Amino acid sequence: MKRFNLEWNRLFAFVVFSIFWSLFGFQVFGKCKKEKVVEFDVNIKRSGEKINGPVTIRLTNINPLRFHNSVSVSTTYLAAQDYKLPFIPTVSASPESMGGIDCVKQYREIKNDVDDLVEKSDGFISSGRKRELLEEITKLSKQIDEFLSNCKDKPETNEDSTHYNQGRKKLRSWNSVFKDIISRGEDAFILEISINDHGFTIGTGKETKVELIKQDRFAEPGAEIIREEIVTVVFSSIFSVSAGFGFSTLDEQEFSIVRSRTSPTDPTLVNKFGFQNRSKFRPMPVILLNTRLFEMSKGFDFHFSTGAGVDIKTGQPAGSDVEFVVGPSISFRRSLFLTPALHVGRVPTLAGGFKVGDLVPAEVTAPPIEKSWKTGFIFTITYKFK
């Protein structure tokens, strides 16, 4: 009885550990795995592409000069700030100056330089001349700093002075954009977003559509935001249930009463204890709960699996048994699972001190069987059904 209780205590601890690890082990183990990073060149148009999450998406060749860029799935955006610089026509009278500086003329020159650089920025980026673009932005920022320092707002006595003050204010906004790009260097041309979504549902998942949102700084106020599809990140549940079959190294033993000769020299038939089935390995149906820990490579994932198998002994005194399987799994396309695992099963032996080959007493009509838990190795092949 003491041995019986010890075996059940060990089995109970094994089952509790397997369930606990399946449900929560990924939170510890999964964090040790570095999240994958996938790069997308925004100059390459794409549609309908899908990748598995979690993932960090890195968008390259972003144009931070012309566009305000962001990545979103479902975000409400306010109207973009109007960066379009106003045109100030040439006036017949001598332009108003400050300290000998023709501020209106200087404004027009800087405006033309800003317009020209923004229009050419896509060409700089697509041709890989980002460093050259940064140098041009740095020079233009210094010109704006000098202009803002020397030329102040004018009294708004006419339309030209109103346009000038508006232009000066927008140049200050442009300079903030320039300085932000300068401070980030070549990182300004990269946009990253981490998309991570773990769920506790079994079998279900979701898809997250990633778009690049661009607000053209030269567009008219209220102009439509530009949306460019990048990729769809597919989140299948970290849990799945699969079923199939396995091959175990635990001995298959089914006992029966066998009519046998008394001895090799005596043809008299007697009843002896013997085997009906005996094998050094046994196939069995299994069902597994798989917890995905991380993606190994495209199409292959690593899981922790635990479940049960059924040792079927149809019509035998020993009866069929539910046995236990636990171990790592590798899946292909998250559908086909290959699992080398620990198998904990019950192996029958003859009870009552009998052994194979002993004569069967007249009052015994079926082999006396006792079962004990043993461990072995099992290799399973299962297919996801939920």
Image (tube, rainbow, N blue to C red):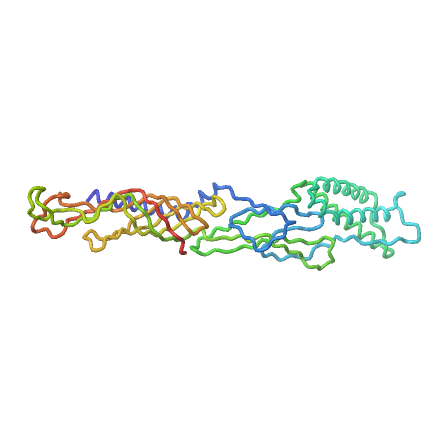
Please state, as top left, top right, bottom left or bottom right, where the C terminus lies in the image.
bottom left
Q: Where is residue 229 in the image (x, y as percent from the top left)?
A: 61, 54
Left or right, residue 109 beside residue 75: right
Of residue 95 and residue 362, the one placed in the foreground of this image is: 362
Which residue is drawn at the image coordinates 65% and 42% (left, top)?
A: 187
Left or right: 239 in relation to 11 = right
Instruction: Indicate whether 100 appears above or below 157.
Output: above
Q: Looking at the rendering, which quadrant does residue 9 occupy?
A: top left
- Residue at the image position 76 percent from the left and 42 percent from the top: 141
Q: Which residue is nearer to you in this view: 337 or 35?
A: 337
Q: Nearer the viewer, residue 33 or 312?
A: 312
Q: Which residue is drawn at 81% across and 48% down?
A: 112
Seen as rendered, the residue at the extreme right is: 93
Q: In this view, does 184 lie to the left or right of 285?
A: right
Q: What residue is at 53 percent from the left and 44 percent from the top?
A: 36
Where is residue 71 shown, x and y percent of the image?
A: 61, 51
